[in-house]
Image: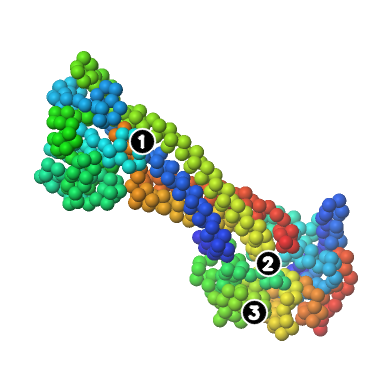
Amino acid sequence: MKLFSLALKNLTRHRLRSLLTVMGVAAGMFLYSSVQTMQESLSGATEMNADDTTLVVYRENRFCPATSRLPEHYLETIKRIPGVSEVLPIQIVVNNCGASLDVIAFRGVPPESLKQYNSDIKIESGSYEQFMKRSDAALIGKHLAQKRGLSTGDKFEAVGVNVYVAGIISSDAPQDENVAYVHLPFLQQASKIGLGIVTQFNVKVDSVNQLDSVAGKIDETFASDQQPTTTRPEKAFFAETAKQMIELIGFTRWLGLGAVLAVLGLVANAVLLIVRGRVKETAILQTLGYSRLAIANIVMLEGVLLGIIGGAVGVLGALGFFHFKAFTIGNEGLTLALSPSPTVLLSGISVSLALGLLASLYPAWKATSRPLVQSLCH
Amino acid sequence: MSFISIRSVTKSFNKGKTTITPLEDLSLDVAKGEFLALMGPSGSGKTTLLNLVAGIDSPTHGELNIDSRNIAGLSRAELTRWRAKHVGYIFQLYHLVPILSAYENVELPLLLGKLSKADRKSKIMAALDLVGLTDRAHHRPSELSGGQEQRVAIARAIVHDPGLLVADEPTGDLDRESADSILALLSQLTREHNKTIVMVTHDPKAAASAHRTLHLEKGQLIEQNLQS
């Protein structure tokens, strides 16, 4: 703690240099955290875990929600298939089927089933009762509301559908953050698709082990029907439709790595300059009895402080940026909200700390390796 | 028994292909509480001798006992620990840390120990009181005169109560008045606090403040003067 205070004061000697280094680290860590946020959001939307028991039934060979038209009466047939615990018919209407950062997706669901089926949904403002009361009511995902500046009580129009905002919702599922849940019959009529037609069925099965067998049975049941189906786990569909998006986001890993290396070089250079500028003073401290370890600790603390301060600014900046800008990537009607998470914060701060430490190892060695008499004559 | 006992000490080092021997077969005794001045032209070996006595450097040959401990064979780390306890170093250009106040500069040697903040404070204030600078405790070096800076450096050298003080031209960068007051302070430290002081100087007036002056030339002791 005593040396920490000394290290902190040392950084104020060349304020501009320290500030520029901190800004450089912040920029690098901003990029790193942005990449991590994208990676995290993507893996949240595509990686299966033991709790994922949801299947999605689409019309076979569908490209976009607009091309998946299934009769609503399939609902009763699917419900009777062994292993199925719940079924939710959904009509989806989107403004853009291609990959886009500006996707608005309406999800029409039977209003009475939404709460029971999707218990992850939390009402941030407004109420579920309000949603039930009006046929044109909508529960708007937090990201969508933020991006469009919507709040409870507002009216909202997109893709020719006019809705009343009955509430703002949040959810652990990144796909729910950018949708507007509306009444199914209302959307069927407003979108002119017509009553009795839905885009998909979301099917919950009794256990994760039954996902494949139930999916197979559903597709088998409707194989010779007029509208054959393709049934897959929800996240597998997302992973397939968003292949290009995943590749693109996968590429950003290299950007993240580049940012980390840039930060490493920047801090190492700054700490090396600090050490070179203080050869004599380091020798004075050694003369006073400071061991090589104590000197190395001071140097490394300075590196760690530069890393941590810059890292905190960059990571918090990135999280704030993603929080306030509420970015959502959409593809083929599926949306992925890029949401900041505590994991990214923790990883960003840990990486900053590790980089600060790693970057100061060589300068710390350099500061202590020179013979004392030689340094005193410097 | 001598506080400092130097026996047949030689120091040599290589510079390129040449071997340089700034000190050769030098023997010397310094009593406890003695104020010794080292004089001589540049390259005579006085700073080398000072560095050996301060434990900053090690002799190539010979014995170097300080307060009954042979420091000639100590490793670099052992010497550092020894210096932290037993030596106070005063530099010509003070070498205070510019971003720290006088108080914090004096505190530097104490940060290595396990003293509480209150204990550190009492020692620092006692040292600053001794050099007459309690009212400048929270001033930074840039806000002090040269003489005051050297007083802070002396407070830093004595705050951990070492038996030995080494001073490398402590008045070399000061005006006459400030130099006299620093020399008076060093004399006070030997007289009232029984510190042993070894001082390198070019200034005959500074040397006159010491109990004894040694003249070195080409790494060898050539003359001793005892002051009355």
Is residue B16 toward the left or the right of residue B163 in the image?
right
Q: Nearer the viewer, residue A197 or B201?
A: A197
Residue situated in front as seen by the camera: A341 or A90: A90
Disc 3 with disc 1 on a shared chain: no
Q: Earlier in the sequence, mark 3 or mark 2?
A: 2
Residue A339 percent location from the top left of the image: 35, 44
Q: Residue at x 62, y 54 (%)?
A: A272
Res A209 → quadrant: top left
Q: Secondary structure at mark 1?
A: loop
Residue ID at (20%, 25%): A70
User: Mark 3 — residue?
Assistant: B145
Image position, residue B201 (x, y; %): 78, 74
Q: Chain of mark 3?
A: B
Please tell me in which quadrant of the rendered image residue B181 appears: bottom right
Residue A30, compared with residue A14, is above or below; it is above
Q: Are marks 3 and 1 in contact (CB under 8 Å)?
A: no
Q: Nearer the viewer, mark 2 or mark 1?
A: 1
Q: Amino acid at mark 2?
A: Val
Are marks 3 and 2 in one subunit? yes
| Residue at 57%, 69% in the rendered image | B100
| Residue A237 shows up from this direction | yes
In the displayed structure, A141 sits above or below B175; it is above
Taking the image as shown, residue A139 lies to the left or right of residue A147, namely left
Mark 3 to mark 2 CA distance (whole Å)? 25 Å
Secondary element at image label 2: strand
Disc 2 chain ID: B
| Residue B23 in picture, x, y percent from top left | 84, 62
In this rendering, does residue A117 appear at all?
A: no
Looking at the picture, how far across and down is residue A312, in whole percent? 45, 53
Q: Which mark is residue A99?
A: 1
